Amino acid sequence: MSDEFSKMFRTMMEQGQEMARAFNPAMENFSFKGFENLIPTMSKDFMEMWFGKTFNRDGLDAKTRLLVTIAALTVLGAHAEPQLKLAIRHALEAGAKKREIAEVIYQMSMFGGLPAMTKALELAQGVFRELDETE
């Protein structure tokens, strides 16, 4: 990361924190750890209506759209852990099989690297275990 980019990123983060403090002073020490647990999984019908038919009536169904999302989030690596967990839960609800999710993540090793793939698989296995325990 260049010094110029690092400086811009630091400034952006500082401005974001200042904005969060202005909206709600308690947000100053907010932690995103476990944030995905605050958002419930949407039902398959709701996801299909919203993501599959509303935005792109003649395009991808919700399951495919979520598998593509998992691919993109896998490539992002550790920057998107909560979002990846949520997308995995939503994909399962939309009808994706665990094996399909794993295959999508495996495929992304070529683009995001082995560490990103390994981390995404660990997160997926964690989601699978959580869901198996609640059933």
Image: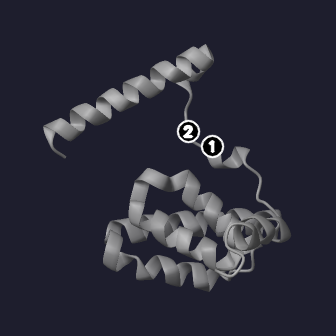
Q: Is residue 60 above or below residue 74?
A: below
Q: Nearer the viewer, residue 69 or 125?
A: 69
Mark 2 neighbour density, 10 Å: few (under 14) some (14–19) many (20 or more): few
Mark 1 neighbour density, 10 Å: few (under 14) some (14–19) many (20 or more): few
Q: Nearer the viewer, residue 122 or 72?
A: 72
Q: Position of residue 95 (x, y in %)?
A: 74, 80
The C terminus - image quarter:
bottom right
Q: Which mark is residue 13?
A: none
Q: Residue at x 70, y 67 (%)?
A: 51
Q: Residue at x 47, y 19 (%)?
A: 18
To which residue does mark 2 refer? 32
Position of residue 38 in the picture relative to residue 118 (left or right) = right
CA separation in Å, label 2 and label 1:
5 Å
Q: Position of residue 12 (x, y in %)?
A: 36, 31
Residue 113, located in which quarter of the rendered image?
A: bottom left
| Amino acid residing under circle 2 | Phe
| Amino acid residing under circle 1 | Phe
Position of residue 115 in the picture relative to residue 28 (left or right) = left
Q: Position of residue 77 (x, y in %)?
A: 40, 60
Secondary structure type for disc 1: helix
Q: Position of residue 38 (x, y in %)?
A: 72, 44
Q: Which mark is residue 35?
A: 1
